[in-house]
Image (spheres, rainbow, N blue to C red):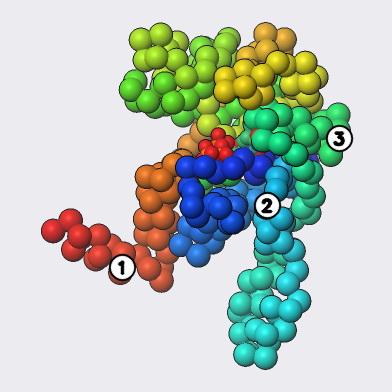
C-alpha cells in the first residue's frame, strides 16, 4: 500500500502574524527568500509523495499560484535575460501535482483534514502542518513513512520537549518499543507539567489511516469550539494501533514569532551566499 498523498491544511487565519497576514497567507511569508510552504512541499516530494492536497480558505489562492506556471513573469524575465530565475520558477511549478479544497470556515484542524476526505479517498495519507519546519538529513515525513510501511498503522511525529513546555503541546502516553519508536497508549492535549504522562510532544507530521475520517465526522467540537485533530487521534488510538516516531532533525515552530526568527537565522546560516555575513553580523550584535 503505497502512500501517495499529503494533505497540507492552510486555512487558518494566522492571527499571531497580523498585520502581515491581513493580506498575505502566513504560509507565503519567506524564510530568507523561500516561502515557508515551499520547504514543506519539498519535504513531501523528497519523501516520494506524489500529490499535495491544500486545504485552503479565503485569501489563500496565492499559495496555489506559487506552485503554478507564471508565463507573464517568465516573459519579462526572458526579456531581461534572467534565465536562472526562469529555471527556478519552472522547477517550482513542476515540483508536484497540486490540488485543493476549500474549508469554508476555520472550524479547526480536524475539520480541515476532514475537508480533504473526498480528495484522499479510502487510502492512508500524510498530514503536514506548514507551521512546522523540520531540517533533517532524511525528510521527517519519510522517517514516519518508513515506520508506516513496516507497521501499516498510523504514525505521528514526536519530539521531546522541556517539562515547562509540555502544556503547549499534545503529549503522548506510550511505551518505547524500539529506539525512537513508540507504541501510543493515549494522547493528552496541553497537560499541566505535573499531570503530563511524558515529555513526548506531537509535532505537525502525521501518517494517518483513512479510518480517521469517520472519527472526525462524528466528533463534536472540542477546545475553543473547534474540531481538533488531537481529539480525533485520541479516538484513533482507542480503535487501532498508533505509533510515534521520535524523528531526527531540528524543528522550528514558525507559527510563533520567535520560532520564525530562529528559523530565519538558522536557514540563513546554512546558505553559502549568506553564511559568513550573517555569522559576522550576529557576532557583532552580541558584542
Ligand atoms: P493554528 O492553530 O496555528 O492557527 O493552526 P492559525 O490560524 O494557522 O494561526 P494563529 O494561531 O491564528 O496565528 C494550525 C494549522 O492548522 C491549519 C492552519 O492553517 C495551520 O496550518 N488550520 C487551522 C486550518 O487549516 N483550518 C482551521 O480551521 C484551523
Q: Quadrant of the C terminus?
A: bottom left
The 10 Å Cα crowd at callout 3, few under 14, some 14 to 19, many 20 or more, is few
Q: Quadrant of the N terminus?
A: top right
Give percent across and percent down for residue 259: 41, 44
- Res. 268 image quadrant: bottom left
Residue at 54% in and 52% down: 21
Disc number at residue 118? Answer: 3
Q: Which of marks 1 and 2 precedes in the sequence?
A: 2
Q: Which of marks 3 and 2 precedes in the sequence?
A: 2
Give percent across and percent down for residue 85: 61, 77
Disc number at residue 60? Answer: 2
- The secondary structure type at the circle numbered 3 is helix
- The relative height of residue 160 versus residue 104 in the rendered view (above or below) is above
Q: Quadrant of ligand 1?
A: top right
Tell me the CA gap for discs 2 and 1: 36 Å
Q: Nearer the viewer, residue 25 or 204?
A: 25
Amino acid at each position: 500500500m503505497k502512500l501517495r498523498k499529503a494533505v497540507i491544511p492552510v486555512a487558518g487565519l494566522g492571527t499571531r502574524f497580523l498585520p502581515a497576514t491581513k493580506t498575505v497567507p502566513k504560509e507565503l511569508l519567506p524564510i530568507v527568500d523561500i516561502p515557508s510552504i515551499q520547504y514543506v512541499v519539498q519535504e513531501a516530494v523528497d519523501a516520494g509523495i506524489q500529490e499535495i492536497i491544500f486545504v485552503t480558505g479565503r485569501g489563500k489562492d496565492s499559495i496555489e499560484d506559487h506552485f503554478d506556471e507564471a508565463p507573464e513573469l517568465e516573459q519579462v524575465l526572458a526579456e531581461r535575460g534572467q534565465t536562472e530565475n526562469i529555471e527556478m520558477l519552472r522547477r517550482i511549478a513542476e515540483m508536484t501535482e497540486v490540488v485543493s479544497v476549500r474549508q469554508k470556515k476555520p472550524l479547526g484542524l480536524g475539520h480541515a483534514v476532514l475537508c480533504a476526505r473526498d480528495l484522499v479517498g479510502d487510502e492512508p495519507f500524510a498530514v503536514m502542518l506548514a507551521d512546522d519546519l523540520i531540517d533533517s538529513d532524511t525528510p521527517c515525513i519519510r522517517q514516519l513513512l518508513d515506520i508506516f510501511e513496516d507497521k501499516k498503522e498510523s504514525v505521528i511525529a514526536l519530539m521531546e520537549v522541556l517539562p515547562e513546555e509540555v502544556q503547549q503541546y499534545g503529549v503522548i502516553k506510550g511505551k518505547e518499543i524500539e529506539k525512537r519508536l513508540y507504541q501510543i497508549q493515549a494522547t493528552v492535549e496541553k497537560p499541566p507539567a505535573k499531570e503530563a504522562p511524558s515529555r513526548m510532544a506531537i509535532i505537525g507530521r502525521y501518517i494517518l489511516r483513512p479510518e480517521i475520517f469517520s472519527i472526525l465526522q462524528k466528533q463534536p467540537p472540542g477546545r475553543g469550539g473547534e474540531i481538533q485533530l488531537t481529539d480525533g487521534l485520541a479516538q484513533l488510538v482507542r480503535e487501532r494501533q498508533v505509533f510515534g516516531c521520535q524523528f531526527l532533525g531540528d524543528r522550528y515552530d514558525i507559527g510563533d514569532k520567535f520560532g520564525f526568527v530562529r528559523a530565519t537565522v538558522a536557514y540563513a546560516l546554512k546558505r553559502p551566499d549568506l553564511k559568513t555575513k550573517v555569522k559576522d553580523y550576529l557576532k557583532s550584535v552580541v558584542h
